[in-house]
Image (tube, coloured by chain):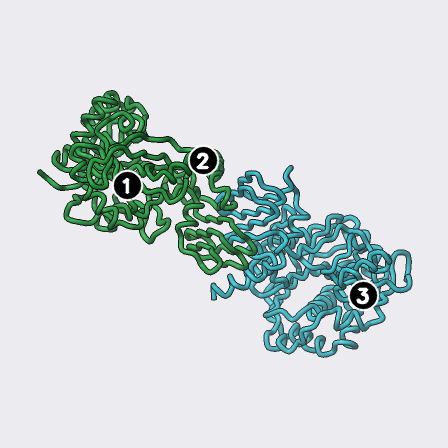
Chain colours: A cyan, B green
Amino acid sequence: MSNKIIPVIMSGGSGTRLWPLSTPAAPKQFHALATANSMIQETALRLVGAEYLAPVAICGRGHRDLVMSQLEAIGKSPQGVILEPFGRNTAAVAAMAALAGQEIDPESLVLLVPADHVITKPRAFHDAVMAASETARERIVTFGITPAHPETGFGYIERGEPLSEGIFEIKKFWEKPNLETATTYVEGGRHDWNAGIFLFSPQVMLEELSLYAPEVLAACVDAYKKAHRDGVIISLDEEAFGQVPSISVDYAVMENTSRSAVIPCDIGWADVGGFAELWRLGEKDDSANHVKGEAILIESQNCLIRNDGGPVVAVIGMSDVMVISTPAGILIAPLSRAQDVKKAAEAAKERRS
Amino acid sequence: MSNKIIPVIMSGGSGTRLWPLSTPAAPKQFHALATANSMIQETALRLVGAEYLAPVAICGRGHRDLVMSQLEAIGKSPQGVILEPFGRNTAAVAAMAALAGQEIDPESLVLLVPADHVITKPRAFHDAVMAASETARERIVTFGITPAHPETGFGYIERGEPLSEGIFEIKKFWEKPNLETATTYVEGGRHDWNAGIFLFSPQVMLEELSLYAPEVLAACVDAYKKAHRDGVIISLDEEAFGQVPSISVDYAVMENTSRSAVIPCDIGWADVGGFAELWRLGEKDDSANHVKGEAILIESQNCLIRNDGGPVVAVIGMSDVMVISTPAGILIAPLSRAQDVKKAAEAAKERRS
């Protein structure tokens, strides 16, 4: 039996919460946010080892060239790039990952990873993948992140009975909780953050999709079969893909199947969901400013300053604000208003159209 | 006797307090700040009437093309453009204005006006010029602005005995006062803001310079005689001009001569010395924001937003700040820190060099 793992990188995010850094033309996964390389590059680079085959990427049609060039630039040329004509949520992505995995090597495992997450402990992540690989022959394994604080922005996975050392059945998936509930989760020690990372056998995923989301699977199989192929590019058939119900893999499969498992792990995971996280994750100067690009700071503290190639940014006497300058726009707001950035992104989009 | 008036426009400011709108290459007088036209254009345009001859401009060498093109664009082609190789303060400017006036028409009067001031009541200004023209045959007339508030950023002129209806001898020039002193000035009703505008006969100015600033006059005459001429361009001789002592006309002449006068007037005058004034003078939206250029404001008040051709500026949840985006830089600061803008301008300059 093959012990190969196919990294399948989900690169579907549109990232309006990080506008103007992230734009529809180049969402956040294509930018170097907390690191030297772009997030999709970091995602590919952290999967090193003889077990990993060349990656497969799943992305929107408009991002084909970005995905190809960014992965080639780091010597991680993809063996497949599946182009979605439009987004159809993660059940469709899981189905495509399973179909591609089955085509490449039915005996392999698929490691389905978002392109826009930070993992600061790649070694620990690799160890968790290795530890889960046996279980992943029979079950869809999710990676549960030991919660660092009672976060209300993530879903949680409640552990069930142990399956083996460090791996558990899943008792229940929980939606984003309120602060009180999140606090009981953290204190109870049986709930982990749902990072949206999956390790599975293509066959198992296809079987569970056929049981719990047969319409998704049928339409995906059709779109995949009718895809236009050009080298590694697999351009899904638009009409067939339009028939795929838009539903998450959590909701369609994970909450229903008994063939699931969770491996709690501490891998330095973070979802750079907004600028507040970016400031928190970034390196700081002595005044707790995170500065990237050409900038002049005078008597300013706790600021996030990003200048992506624009004229010099000068900030005088400001605290707790973000200033983001890119060719797509210039954003100024208190870091506490990071959740309202999408309003500006939408207004900017309307203005252009 | 000629009743002609030659407007001589002083365009020497470097305007670091308005960086990055104002830069060494294009200081504030070349920008449309509070109005549709640039400040130097507004300065030329407000002097309409049969009395006014074509203007003369005095500027730095590097601004020759800007001065020519901006004045030609509004049909105010200058009859002379005097190029200074470097700045030598306003006594030299007054001397050059007098020399040019004498050359053009010794019987005319020179109206020496800064290129970077706002005058919202041009009709009242014209009336004041007319009212002062008789006195200006014998005296250097300054325009005293009725103070609107106890401003500590300007010098004041104290009136002496009346010379004629509405025109006074000058008792004393006062440096920028503290708030207490400024308050007594405003309450006393005998002090006016010194706007740095002068009306004089070329002959009178030359006589007073020869009495009180003979070194300035001698070096200026030398530099003017040796100037390289090309059409209307008078490029002052660098070596000779280098011999001119750097001193203000107030300090060199006005504080010493008895041949002076002040005409108090209410002409809607403002010195756009910094961004706080620009916000105060500008049109506001319902939330007291002054916005020029492409911008998105969300829940923001009392802001000054200027976007000179850059990508869209989005401001969320900010109050009392300025955001200035130009190809030379992007500035973010509280409006209350407007006086510190020159620090950023200097840092930006150092960075480039």
Relative side of B241 to A327, left or right: left
Label 2 to label 1, Cα distance in Å? 22 Å
* Whether marks 2 and 3 lie on the same chain: no
Q: Disc number at residue B264?
A: 1
Q: First in sequence: mark 2 or mark 1?
A: 2
The chain ID associated with circle 2 is B
Please, what is the three-letter code of the amino acid marked with disc 3? Ile
Label 2 to label 3, Cα distance in Å? 78 Å
Quick one: B228 or A248, which is closer to the camera?
B228
A262 is higher (above) or lower (below) than A224: above
Badge 3 is on which residue?
A140
Residue occupying the point 18% across, 36% down: B135
Q: Secondary structure at mark 1?
A: strand
The chain ID associated with circle 3 is A
Relative side of A199 to A342, left or right: right
Q: Give residue B99's quadrant in the image.
A: top left
Label 2 Cα crowd, 10 Å radius (few <14 / some 14-19 / many 20+): few
Quick one: B190 or B4, which is closer to the camera?
B190
Q: Secondary structure at mark 2?
A: helix
Badge 2 is on which residue?
B180
